[in-house]
Image: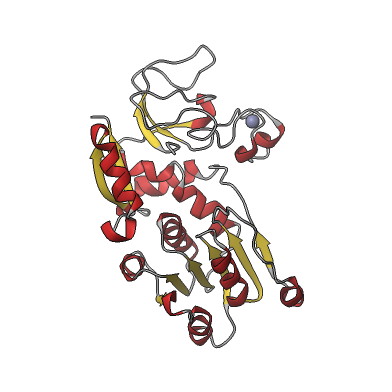
């Protein structure tokens, strides 16, 4: 919690070169030194003195002030003329959907992409998959409201999986072949199983979901199908590129924001986010102003 945000620099440490007091900044969910072995490979997720620590191992952004370690490599200047609030979507969900879903899944022009889970990260994958012009994007979710949003965001086919027939429906939409790229954006055993059943021969399963328990891997069925399975924690190495697409209007992250609360009303914000289906909530902005 509290691993996303934008803000204004109030004070800088002596090791910080790229930022000064008063700068408006985007805060990356990943803190990285930029100097260790993993950082040199742009694998900031596994920085030897950082990674995903903000709001996880150290205090996060849901406060009046927040300390960002390794600021030079973990903050980004906010470009002129960009909707600052919308950039909160670039702290985590857009780079996650892009790097762990779209890039790891190797989405190509003409592909059929299936995204399991139309929550914020699934929708972020849907938005950024379109950089590569797939032919079809099939969105799969239990909630019709989220599927409607997915349609507005560019999904070409919607599958409501609440009747337990998602596999049959996806197969019917793909000439019984399955999808070239399947993204798992939920993180529970049934959705991971669904991905294995709808991936095309030679296809990719890109796991984005954060799993809390182990899942079954049907290697006995998949070994012969030449599939690739990828997992990962976002490195946010794509953030500078994503900022350019926001600045030019190609990517519109503000679409993901459904609710806004002041810091004093944070408990209300949690109630809304905890009842996302009831309140039709995607991303909730909490502001100190
Ligand atoms: Zn590092």
Residue 233 located left or right of residue 153: right
Q: Which residue is drawn at 58% across and 54% down?
A: 211
Asked whether the viewer can see residue 49, the reply is yes
Residue sitting nearer the eye, 204 or 143: 143
Where's residue 196, x and y in %?
62, 72
Vertical relation: 41 (above or below) 61 = below
Tell me the quadrant of the picture where the N terminus can be found: top left
Vertical relation: 163 (above or below) 237 = below
Tell me the quadrant of the picture where the C terminus can be found: top left
Residue sitting nearer the eye, 262 or 212: 212
Q: Which residue is drawn at 27% across and 30% down?
A: 288
- Quarter holding ligand 1: top right
Asked whether the viewer can see residue 160, the reply is no
Where's residue 14, x and y in %?
51, 11
Q: Which residue is drawn at 44% across and 75% down?
A: 161
Vertical relation: 37 (above or below) 156 = above
């Amino acid at each position: 919690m509290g691993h996303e945000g934008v803000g204004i620099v109030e004070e800088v440490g002596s090791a910080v070169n790229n930022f000064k007091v008063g700068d408006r900044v985007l805060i990356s969910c990943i803190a990285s030194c930029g100097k260790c072995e993993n950082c040199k490979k742009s694998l900031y997720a596994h920085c030897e003195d950082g990674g995903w620590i903000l709001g996880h191992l150290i205090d996060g952004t849901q406060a009046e002030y927040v300390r960002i370690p390794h600021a030079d490599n973990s903050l980004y200047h906010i470009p002129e003329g960009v909707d600052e609030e919308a950039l909160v979507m670039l702290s985590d969900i857009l780079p996650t959907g892009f790097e762990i879903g779209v890039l790891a899944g190797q989405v190509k022009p003409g592909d059929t992409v299936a995204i399991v889970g139309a929550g914020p990260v699934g929708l972020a994958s849907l938005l950024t998959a379109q950089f590569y012009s797939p032919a079809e994007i099939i969105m799969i979710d239990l909630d019709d409201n989220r599927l409607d949003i997915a349609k507005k965001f560019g999904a070409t086919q919607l599958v409501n999986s609440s009747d337990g027939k998602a596999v049959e429906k996806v197969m019917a939409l793909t000439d019984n072949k399955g999808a070239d790229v399947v993204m798992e954006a939920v993180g529970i055993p049934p959705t991971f199983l669904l991905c294995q059943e709808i991936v095309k021969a030679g296809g990719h399963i890109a796991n984005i979901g954060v799993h809390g328990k182990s899942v079954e891997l049907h290697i006995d069925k998949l070994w012969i199908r030449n599939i690739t399975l990828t997992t990962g924690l976002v490195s946010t190495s794509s953030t500078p590129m994503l900022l350019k697409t926001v600045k030019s209007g190609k990517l519109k992250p503000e679409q993901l924001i459904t609710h806004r609360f002041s810091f004093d009303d944070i408990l209300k914000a949690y109630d809304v986010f905890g009842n996302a289906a009831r309140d039709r909530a995607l991303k909730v902005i909490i502001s100190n102003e």
